[in-house]
Amino acid sequence: MTIYYEDIAVDDELPTIERTPTEDAAIDFFGRDNPTNPAFRDAEVGRKQGFGGALVPGNLKIAWLTQFVSSWAGPEASVRNLRVAFRRPDIAGRPLTLAGRVVDKRQEDGRNVIELEVVTLAEGEPSVRANVQVDVPSRG
């Protein structure tokens, strides 16, 4: 479904979705032989480090947020810019809610620009915050 510039208002809420990263999905995102923190590739190491399991890679959460925005905006829209701030780690097996709202709407250089604030929420607390700029079509 396509969303049009004329149908969007500042403070519109995006429909939330819930995603639960499994330990396998979190580990497989980077690969089991990833050289970074072992808690990204081994749930037992994550538990020993006090995290409670495998860490969910930030890049996986960015991918989910980009997909969340793209699905909302529709096939004729383009994600132009994404700025992300990581607030706290997430643990595989725990549900994440993806939510967002429109914070600005403008026409710029012939483009219909929508600015969004989107977040991943774990137990009601933001773990990732992002500002996303999306170009959407006009009805005309």
Image (spheres, rainbow, N blue to C red):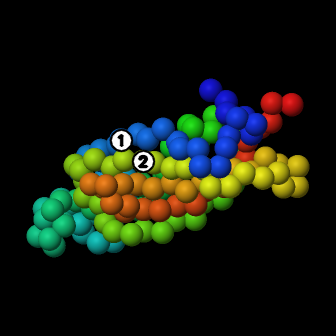
Residue drawn at x 72%, y 51% is 105
Left or right of 89 in this view: 13:
right
**Image quadrant of residue 59?**
bottom left
**Mark 2 belongs to which amino acid?**
Leu
Whether residue 25 is visible: no
Asked if 14 appears above or below 54 in the picture, the reply is: above
User: Residue 128 location in percent, x, y?
Assistant: 42, 62
**Image quadrant of residue 2?**
top right
Front in this rendered view, residue 25 or 61:
61
**Mark 1 belongs to which amino acid?**
Glu
Left or right of 10 in this view: 111:
right
Residue drawn at x 31%, y 66% is 89
User: Residue 35 location in percent, x, y?
Assistant: 33, 70
Q: Which mark is residue 98?
A: 2
Q: Which mark is residue 18?
A: 1
Q: Tags 2 and 1 in contact by the CB under 8 Å rule? A: yes
Residue drawn at x 68%, y 40% is 8
Query: How far apart are labels 2 and 1 at the CA level?
Result: 6 Å
Identify the mark nearer the N-term, 2 or 1: 1
Front in this rendered view, residue 107 or 22:
107
Whether residue 127 is visible: yes
